[in-house]
């Protein structure tokens, strides 16, 4: 039995339903969308229908307008990407009656990347993202937005437990999919990841695209897993995969639509140049990534250091989960100069203020680990707020007034407890 977790995006979902006619909860399969919306439906007498049901899907696709007209509202429609015809019918219904909360939709494909669908509900629909479980949700920690805290929270007034390597390895290997988290046996977790990928290939890929070689997609995912946390280079991936670049880009877009890969754009002050600099590519779940590259508990606990790309992927996934309910409306980038000075992640607010984040798998940090952050500070002195190196160590350590080393265990701290004034004086 899978544990029922409190999802930190829930308050935002309630707020959206209170003032918006259509709310879409978007995310990969098996992130917990159906569980969350069914709990809402039960609590608020909201009808629940899933388009994974063959009869419901047939009715929705056969006569979308009649299907929508015949619903008792408010209604939840699960896996709505399976019947894109519904969006125009929902638009027409909402244009006649804009009462809030009429339609709660879920999608396992990013409808914002699907042609025509996003435009049809512009101004009528709010989109929220549900990623796999965050470490804080798994630990049943309070709803503290840790991305906002990293951005400009009171660094010297928080206690974070030491980062235990065994615990970190467990987080890296399990990832955040609720079903995978619930399986303590590595063999059973591997079986779940295998069946998860197979189900996506057999159902979602066939639904969304006419793919000539279905076997090429799993092979591409395997290849992309080895590139997680690196710059996206289509020419190199084309050579390695044997796929023509036109086919590769089509398959890559399909995997993006299914939330299986994530493209992190490059930051630059000149907005027009952001689009021409190479993005970084991630598989946004460390557990799925570890499964695909065949990393085990024995390999990770016995080695001298943890794989940097795996740890960076873990941090990316945690940032995305917290950014989904950021009160500061932060955006996420990476930073890289032509001379290869880089910062793994950059958080930016609407005023253009920046916080840089470097990820280090080691339990030791020295001044050299702040090189990229210092460069960002010197290049953007008015915008730079602070730089943080996340590492697998024990303490929050200041390296300057605005440069800190912070343990990776911040992501699963059960509470971030303010220290007393007396403790602050003694620090």
Image (spheres, helix red, strand yellow):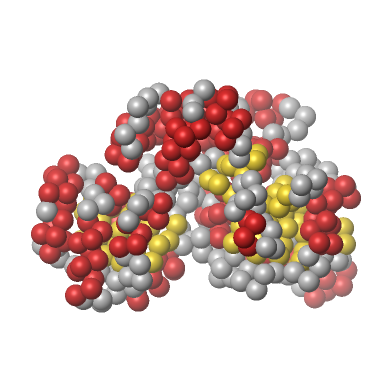
Q: Residue at x 81, y 61 (%)?
A: 379
Viewer-proximal residue among 53 and 346: 346
Which quadrant holds residue 24?
Answer: bottom left
**Above or below 133: residue 383:** below
Q: Residue at x 86, y 66 (%)?
A: 401
Residue 177 visible, this angle: no
Residue 102 visible, this angle: yes
Q: How many marks?
A: 0
Q: Where residue 88 sits in the image (x, y, percent)?
A: 23, 61
Q: Where residue 39 sits in the image (x, y, percent)?
A: 32, 59
Q: With 67 as the anchor, is 46 left or right in this view?
A: right
Q: With 53 as the anchor, is 16 left or right in this view?
A: right
Image quadrant holding the N terminus, namely top left
Q: Residue at x 41, y 43 (%)?
A: 258
Viewer-proximal residue among 364 and 112: 112
Q: Residue at x 22, y 53 (%)?
A: 85
Q: With 134 as the anchor, is 16 left or right in this view?
A: left
Image quadrant holding the C terminus, namely bottom right
**Above or below 90: residue 138:** above
Q: Where residue 336 sits in the image (x, y, percent)?
A: 73, 49
Q: Where residue 391 sits in the image (x, y, percent)?
A: 75, 47
**Above or below 323: residue 278:** above
Which quadrant holds residue 100?
Answer: bottom left
């Amino acid at each position: 039995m899978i544990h029922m977790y409190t999802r930190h995006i829930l308050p935002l979902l309630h707020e959206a339903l209170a003032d918006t006619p259509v709310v879409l909860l978007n995310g990969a399969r098996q992130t917990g969308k159906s569980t969350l919306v069914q709990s809402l439906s039960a609590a608020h007498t909201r009808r629940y229908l899933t388009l994974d049901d063959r009869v419901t899907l047939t009715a929705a696709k056969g006569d979308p307008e009649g299907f929508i007209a015949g619903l008792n509202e408010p209604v939840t429609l699960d896996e709505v990407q399976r019947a894109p015809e519904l969006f125009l019918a929902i638009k027409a219904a909402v244009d006649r009656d804009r009462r809030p909360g009429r339609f709660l939709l879920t999608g396992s494909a990013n409808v914002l990347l699907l042609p025509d669908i996003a435009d049809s509900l512009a101004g009528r629909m709010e989109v929220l993202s549900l990623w796999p479980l965050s470490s804080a949700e798994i630990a049943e920690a309070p709803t503290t937005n840790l991305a906002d805290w990293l951005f400009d929270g009171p660094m010297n007034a928080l206690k974070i437990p030491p980062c235990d390597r065994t615990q970190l390895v467990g987080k890296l290997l399990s990832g955040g999919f609720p079903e995978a988290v619930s399986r303590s046996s590595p063999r059973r977790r591997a079986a779940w990841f295998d069946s998860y990928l197979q189900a996506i290939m057999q159902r979602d890929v066939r639904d969304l695209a006419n793919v000539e070689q279905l076997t090429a997609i799993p092979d591409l995912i395997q290849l992309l897993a080895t590139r997680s946390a690196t710059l996206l280079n289509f020419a190199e991936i084309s050579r390695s995969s044997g796929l023509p670049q036109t086919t590769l880009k089509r398959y890559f877009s399909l995997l993006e639509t299914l939330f299986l890969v994530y493209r992190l754009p490059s930051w630059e002050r000149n907005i027009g140049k952001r689009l021409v600099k190479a993005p970084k590519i991630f598989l946004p779940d460390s557990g799925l990534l570890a499964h695909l590259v065949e990393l085990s508990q024995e390999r990770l606990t016995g080695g001298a250091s943890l794989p940097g790309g795996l740890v960076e992927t873990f941090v990316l996934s945690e940032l995305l989960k917290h950014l989904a309910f950021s009160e500061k409306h932060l955006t996420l980038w990476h930073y890289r100069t032509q001379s290869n000075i880089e910062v793994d992640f950059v958080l930016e607010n609407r005023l253009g203020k920046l916080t840089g984040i470097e990820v280090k798998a080691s339990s030791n940090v020295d001044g050299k680990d702040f090189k990229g952050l210092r460069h960002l500070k010197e290049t953007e002195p008015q915008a730079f707020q602070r730089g943080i190196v996340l590492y697998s160590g024990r303490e929050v350590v200041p390296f300057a007034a605005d440069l800190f080393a912070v343990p990776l265990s911040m992501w699963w701290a059960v509470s971030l407890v303010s220290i007393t004034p007396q403790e602050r004086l003694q620090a």
